Image: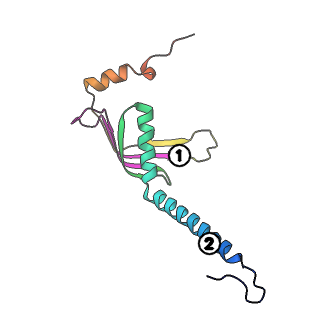
Amino acid sequence: MNTSSPTTGRHDNKAPKHRRKWRVVGAVAAVLATGALLFASGFPQKRLAEYAIRRATGLSARVEGLSLYPRVHIERLDVFTGIPEAPPALRVQNLAIEYAAFPDTGRWIRHVSAEHIRLHLDSALTARLQHTPSAEPARAP
């Protein structure tokens, strides 16, 4: 393709720069659209909630039906001990956490409610809970 000007014979470098600019704009738009679709689907939030539970408790979790606005709502939360074929150690249905983004009183969480909570304690979970650092009473200095 000849990009030289017919009157001056010099090459016109504006066309490649212009195309490059639109490619960058298109790539940024594609990344933003993908991020918006992922956020709307709830996939990253679900994985983040499962990761946070695993980090806090050392137990795996499965979250179903997560929404974040106007309150955190989880249709079903299952927490597992890791024992194959064992029922969930904790099952919570319709967990709702009302929060304040900018609290006046310093309280981020206003109210927590759940429709159904089922706790299944077995010997492995009981032993695990007894040996966690947070389960030991604090000692005076």
Q: Residue 86 sits in which quadrant? A: top left
Residue at horizontal 71 percent and vertical 83 percent from the top = 4
Between discs 1 and 2, the one toward the N terminus: 2
Label 1: state its secondary structure: strand
Residue at horizontal 62 percent and vertical 39 percent from the top = 105
Identify which residue, 136 or 17, lies in the foreground: 17
Q: Amino acid at mark 2?
A: Trp
Q: Quadrant of the C terminus?
A: top right
Residue 82 painted magenta? yes
Q: Mark 1 touching mark 2, by CB under 8 A? A: no
According to the image, label 1 marks what residue?
Answer: 99
Q: Amino acid at mark 1?
A: Tyr
For the residues carrying marks 1 and 2, which lies nearer the camera in this image?
Answer: 2
Question: Which residue is outermost to the right?
Answer: 8
According to the image, label 2 marks what residue?
Answer: 22
Q: Residue 5 sits in which quadrant? A: bottom right
Query: Which residues are drawn in magenta?
Result: 73-98
Q: Residue 60 location, x and y as percent?
A: 35, 37
Q: Residue 9 location, x and y as percent?
A: 75, 84
